[in-house]
Image: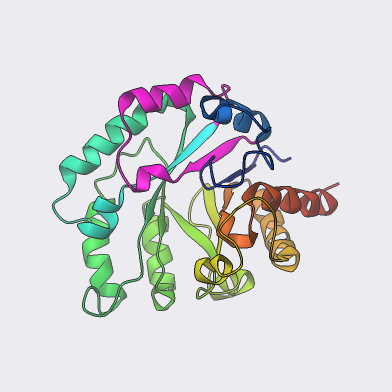
Amino acid sequence: MSSRLCLGTSAFTAAGWEGSFYPAGMQPRDFLTYYAAKFDTVEVDSTFYRTPSASTVRGWYAKTPPNFKFALKVPQEITHEKCLHDCEAQFREFLDAAELLREKLGPILFQFGYFNRDTFPDLDAFLKRLLPFLDKLPKEHRFAVEIRNKNFLLPKFVDALRERRLALAIIDQSWMPSPAEWFSRFDPVSTDFTYIRWLGDRKGIEEKTKTWDKLVIDRRRDLSEWARLCVPIVRRGVTIFAYANNHYAGHSPATIAQFLEIWEKLNP
């Protein structure tokens, strides 16, 4: 694997992983240590729901090797409930916890939901709220921004992130552009790292399964397209952090294994 390609899953626990990814009978307290022997990064989903305690974060640090990286989601209280308004105290509390990871702290993701016209009628209205907040971010950390309004994906938005050295989160989700479409509209790589999320169709896949122990959708064609798009990014010297969700194909560890198989054929 390229040192500039950091692959992991969205969370390190899920229904069905014991016996399919984790050895049967393994204690949950040992999951992260086992996971970190297989992957070099994880996107922590739980921080989206609440800021973790200091003891939890210190436990993550202690259970992982020196070069491991944690990508953390900013809590939904900040991105969804308050939508960046009057949340400085909550964001400082979150950063204080995140910084306990020290050198293992990877990208911090602002994952925004879909905005209806009553919330932000257009991109300019969103940027009016977003940019003053981004301008206050500490420069020593890496941040990525994800939006789910495809009509907001305009050069103006990416240029605003580029000016601030923030990454655009490039997502593979049912209602968002296809992988190639992202790159045909503009250069979505806006800083020295990029952030890819394989999310899929949550509603569609939950009609097939809610036990995430095996692949139930064939995404090889999509992953092959992603691999081809990632090759020139890595050659530019840009680090890629890419994370698979169980909803993408049914079992995120197997999605990463499938991507790696494709990647290694492209980069023998």
Direction top: furthest residue: 62
**Residue 233, magenta (yes or no):** no
- In the orientation shown, which residue stands out farthest toward the left? 86
Q: Is residue 57 above or below residue 238?
A: above
Residue displayed at 61% across by 47% down: 16
User: In the picture, which quadrant includes the N terminus?
Assistant: top right
Residue 187 seen in this snapshot: no
Task: Give the answer, above or below, for where 21 lies relative to 84.
Answer: above
Q: Nearer the viewer, residue 20 or 105?
A: 20
Q: How many marks?
A: 0
**Residue drawn 27% across and 59% down?**
80
Left or right: 127, with 65 as reference point:
left
Indicate the quadrant where residue 59 lies. top left
Rendering coords of residue 99 (x, y %):
35, 29
Furthest-front residue in this view: 25
- Magenta span covers which residues? 39-68
Residue 151 at what x, y percent from top left? 41, 79
**Residue 121 visible at all:** yes
Height in image: 84 above or below 225?
A: above
- The image quadrant that residue 145 belongs to is bottom left
Say whether residue 190 is left or right of residue 76. right
Q: Is residue 98 left or right of residue 41?
A: left
Q: Position of residue 171 (x, y in %)?
A: 52, 63
Q: Give the camera-side residue of 93 and 126.
A: 93
Q: Is residue 24 left or right of residue 65?
A: right
Which residue lies at the image location 58% right of the left edge and 50% below the top edge? 242
Q: Horizontal and vertical percent for residue 18?
A: 62, 39
* Residue 53 colored in magenta in the image: yes
Give the quadrant of residue 97.
top left
